[in-house]
Image (spheres, helix red, strand yellow):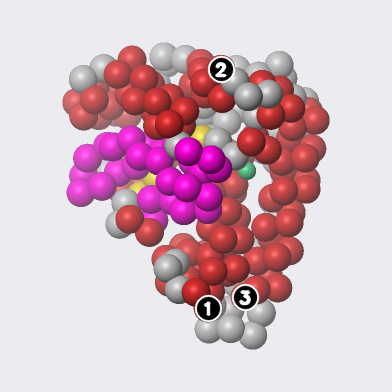
């Protein structure tokens, strides 16, 4: 497949003040575009050309010959979802019932999930992602470095937060925990998380 940059599902200034127009202009228009451009260049003429994005991510992982394919296709996958994992006036405690029930079942409470997710994001050394994933029918929090994601660990991501500095440094400088708190309290699009959960529930 050819990777293409999607439009944001909202305007560049729609997530302010929690994520600024400037951040989205750099993060979406420049960083994500670079993953798309470099990914297409890396995939061209290789065995990955006819595969789905998920297959490219899974099959390029861990091989020195395809590290460029994995890094860019992985980040393309992660960012495609990341834009949809946020919305204006998102976050907070109003979750679709089925998802809320499952979170309470597997974490004990919504507050415990949020604390675990924020700790995973804050504790990821260097660039990476914090995740809510479904593995063997159970919800789990995880973290990964760089372009890695739950797909390569036999799990399905249903929520992810980008903790690369390009995602928060303009708005929060070095205060990554404040960015994670704003993400959970004001940005998460729980309906999109629920849609992804419904596919594997
Ligand atoms: Fe990013």
Q: Residue 8, percent across and down?
A: 70, 40
Q: Quadrant of the N terminus?
A: bottom right
Q: Which is closer to the viewer, label 2 or label 3?
A: 2
Assess disc 2: are there few (<14), some (14-19) or many (≥20) residues with their C-alpha within 10 Å of its C-alpha: some
Question: Element type at marker 1?
Answer: helix
Vertical relation: 25 (above or below) 78: above
Among the 4 quarters of the image, the one containing residue 141:
top left
Going from the N terminus, do you reach mark 2 or mark 3 first? Answer: 3
Residue 166: image x %, image y %? 68, 38
Q: Quadrant of the C terminus?
A: top left
Q: Outermost residue toward the front?
A: 125
> Residue at 28% of width from left, 26% of height from top?
103
Residue at numbered disc 2: 178
The x, y position of residue 98, in whole percent, is 29, 28
Q: CA distance from mark 2 to mark 3?
A: 37 Å
Q: CA distance from mark 1 to mark 2?
A: 38 Å
Q: Tell me the residue at 44%/67% (across/down).
A: 61
Determine which of the numbered discs, if any, sits on residue 65 in the image: 1
**Front position in the image: 26 or 139:** 26
Identify the residue under disc 3. 43
Looking at the image, residue 32 sits to the left or right of residue 157; the answer is right
Magenta residues span 125-151
Q: Position of residue 33 (x, y in %)?
A: 74, 54
In this rendering, position of residue 195 left or right of residue 163: left
Label 3: element kind: helix
Whichever of callouts 1 and 2 sits on the residue coming sooner in the sequence is 1
């Amino acid at each position: 497949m050819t990777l293409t940059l999607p439009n944001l599902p909202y305007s560049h200034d729609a997530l302010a003040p929690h994520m600024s127009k400037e951040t989205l202009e750099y993060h979406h228009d420049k960083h994500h575009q670079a993953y798309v451009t470099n990914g297409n260049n890396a995939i061209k003429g290789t065995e990955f050309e006819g595969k789905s994005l998920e297959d490219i991510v899974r099959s390029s992982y861990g091989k020195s010959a395809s590290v460029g394919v994995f890094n860019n296709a992985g980040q393309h996958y992660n960012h495609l979802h990341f834009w949809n994992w946020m919305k204006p006036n998102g976050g907070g405690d109003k979750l679709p019932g089925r998802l809320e029930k499952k979170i309470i079942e597997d974490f004990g409470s919504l507050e415990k999930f949020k604390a675990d997710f924020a700790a995973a994001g804050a504790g990821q050394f260097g660039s990476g992602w914090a995740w809510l994933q479904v593995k063997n029918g159970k919800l789990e929090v995880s973290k990964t470095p760089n372009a890695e994601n739950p797909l390569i660990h036999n799990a399905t991501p249903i929520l992810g937060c980008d903790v690369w500095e390009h995602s928060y440094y303009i708005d929060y400088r070095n205060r990554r925990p404040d960015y994670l708190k704003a993400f959970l309290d004001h940005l998460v699009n729980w309906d999109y998380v629920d849609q992804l959960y419904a596919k594997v529930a």
